[in-house]
Image: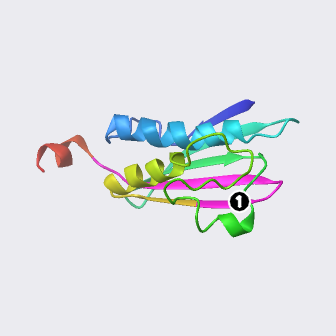
Amino acid sequence: VKLVLEDELKTDIVTDAERLRIILRNVIGNSLKYSKESNPYVKCSLKKDNGYIFIYIIDNGIGIEKQHLTNIFNMFYKGSLKSTGSGLGLYIAKESVQTLKGTIEISSEEGKGTEVVIKLPELSLESIITQ
């Protein structure tokens, strides 16, 4: 799988590192698990806008069928017959994003790939110290 990183931030992200690691592990793990056999890629882009950090994870994997998109963040939900996991990965990712006061959205087209957009508030060390 070709992995591409586009970092427009050029700076560190101030957040809960362990929660961010859990989020990225679950989302990127799905991109890798459900990649296509021919020319698979996963692209991660980091951007900043209007006081928020945006993390885009885009792949050209097998995608998610439309009827599953409304349920993919539910606990124990498996959106594919190819799923070998517990159905907790995206649930845990969403819970972790919400704990960080952010949002996560997924758009996908079966056979074409998936895009995940994670939006987290931009924090500074000063704001954390004064809380």
- Helix, strand or loop for the magenta stretch, by majority: strand
Q: Is residue 124 left or right of residue 115?
A: left
| The N terminus, quarter of image | top right
Residue 36 x %, y % = 82, 40
Q: Is residue 125 left or right of residue 112?
A: left
35 vs 76: above or below: above
Q: Is residue 109 magenta?
A: yes
User: Which residue is label 1 attached to?
Assistant: 108
37 vs 107: above or below: above
Amino acid at dot 1: Ser
User: Label 1: few (<14), some or many (≥20) within 10 Å?
Assistant: many
Residue 83 x %, y % = 68, 44
108 vs 43: above or below: below
Residue drawn where x is 38% and y is 49% of the image: 96
> Quarter-wise, where is residue 4 in the image?
top right
Say which of 57 and 14 sits in front: 57
Residue drawn where x is 49% and y is 56% of the image: 75
Q: Residues in magenta?
A: 106-123
Q: Is residue 79 magenta?
A: no
Residue 115 x %, y % = 65, 54
Residue sitting farthest toward the right: 38
Residue drawn where x is 63% and y is 42% of the image: 30
